[in-house]
Image (cartoon, helix red, strand yellow):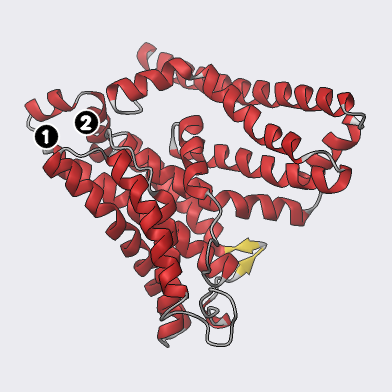
Amino acid sequence: MNALQTSMNLGRFRIFTNIAIFASSLIVTMLVVAGLVELIGGSATSALSAMVEGVLGSRQAIVETVIEATPTALCGLAFLIPFKAGFFNIGAQGQLQLGALAAVFVTTAFTLPAPLMVVLAFAAAAAAGMLLIVPPLLLKTKRGASEVTTTVMLNFVAVEFVLAMVTGPMKQPDSFFAESALIPVEYRLPVIVVHVGVFLAVAIVVIAGWILKHTVFGFRLEALGGNPGAAQALGMRTNITLTKAVLAAGAVAGIAGGIQALGVVFQVAELWAKPWGFLGILAALIGRSPVGVMFAALLLAGLETGGRNMQAMTGVPAALVFLLQALPVLLLLAVRSTHLFKMISFGGVGR
């Protein structure tokens, strides 16, 4: 009973600590931004009010922030899952783009009942994401190649492949731009305040959190990331565990692209994607758990939408908006620098 009580108290302490760290970083950022706005002759009150209004000022602002956070959260999960096993997936950006391309291809090339088509589109998106992550996985397990290098390189391959498709076989015939045909209206995700892809993303995050914390697979990931040699010595099939984690990551990133295609943009085009894959890495390093990644993604999205509104309403320099977006992230990472060093040293996130 004492051990259980101690564990519960430790859990509460960690939650309180994380909340305090987030709040402190935001307060420091607001103070710095307010000081700089006053320094350049603006009104700090007006600037900060515009920022808050851009995030929480209306139903539309909240919806926009949530939708913006969705691909970042899933890309963060695509980094976090294999990271726990010591695999650095820097390729979520490319996996997302191929996932979106696959979803658009399926929905524009075939005709099926809408529910079946949506399921097929997401399956294609997940398969495309997994396909792009297979080469780095094989090169790491068979040849010992650095997955950081290979996943980064495949991001560029994905971008060029998307460009080749939207200027070639998937190009919209009557368009002057490098873009695909639009997904038919009947195949787009329905909207319940936000499109249902947001609810799918939340479900994926919750399921991933439960798997990582309460299943044997989650324990094996922790063991593999913490000490690969010991895990192998104890008879764990480390390559199988790593393969499952890496393929799951590719599927999640691909689904993120499918959600964007079916719920937001409805087509793919040249340079259509924001850097959600790289923002996801930041969200993973800040959040450190699936649910934490989700809240970190909301933070990053809120900083973007709030900063954009602040610039539009008050005319503050773009550099100040970039500072607003970057400073809290730097503060959060600085506070956790010791923990991050341990993660990188041991190849996993740890408990």
| Residue matched to label 1 | 236
Of the numbered discs in the image, which one, if any, rests on residue 52?
none
Q: Is residue 301 left or right of residue 45?
A: left
Q: Is residue 117 visible?
A: no
Pinpoint residue 120: horizontal percent, then vertical percent.
Answer: 37, 74
Q: Is residue 46 visible?
A: yes
Mark 2 and mark 1 residues within 8 Å of each other at the beta carbon: yes
> Residue at image x 26%, y 29%?
225
> Could you tell me the amino acid type at mark 2?
Leu
Q: Is residue 317 above or below residue 275?
A: above
Pinpoint residue 197: horizontal percent, then vertical percent.
Answer: 53, 61
> Could you tell me the amino acid type at mark 1?
Met
Q: Rounded to the nearest whole Å, what is the CA distance between mark 2 and mark 1?
A: 9 Å
Pinpoint residue 31: horizontal percent, then vertical percent.
Answer: 78, 22
> Residue at image x 11%, y 34%?
236
Instruction: Name the residue nearer the viewer: 1 or 307.
Output: 307
Marked residue nearer the N-terminal end (2 or 1): 2
| Residue matched to label 2 | 224
